[in-house]
Amino acid sequence: MKRKLYRSLSDRQLAGVCGGLASFLGVDATITRLLLLFLALAGGPGVLVYLVMVVVVPVEPRRIIFEEEQARS
């Protein structure tokens, strides 16, 4: 099955960008949050990347969340 990048509805702090990116990459969301924070504080493009992803990356469809919850049960 082809993976798609979505903003997470279940693992979100602000807009779900880091949660969705972590799910897409198969890593913990804390790692992506820390990476973007580091990029932002180091004068890099962290804030800009986050804002662009909020606009560009679509929100995760509810049916995917339902299927994931069913798979866990």
Image (cartoon, grey):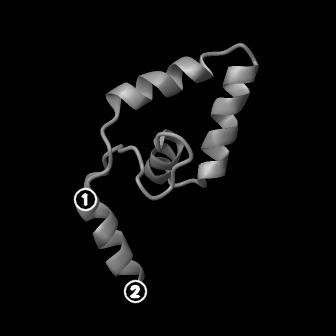
Q: Which mark is residue 66?
A: none
The crowd level at tag 1 (other Cα within 10 Å; few <14, some 14-19, many 20+) is few
Give the labeled residue for mark 2: 73
Q: Secondary structure at mark 2?
A: loop
Name the outermost residue toward the bottom.
73
On screen, residue 18 versus residue 72, left or right, reads right
Hey, what amino acid is under mark 1? Answer: Met
Q: Amino acid at mark 2?
A: Ser
Q: Residue furthest top?
A: 43
- Nearer the observer: mark 1 or 2; the answer is 2
- Give the image location of residue 9, x and y in percent: 40, 53
Q: Nearer the viewer, residue 28 or 65?
A: 65
Q: For the residue carrying disc 2, how many other residues have a C-alpha within 10 Å: few (<14), some (14-19), or many (20+)?
A: few
- How far, Cα to Cα, is label 1 from label 2? 21 Å
Mark number displayed over residue 1: 1
Q: Nearer the viewer, residue 37 or 23?
A: 37
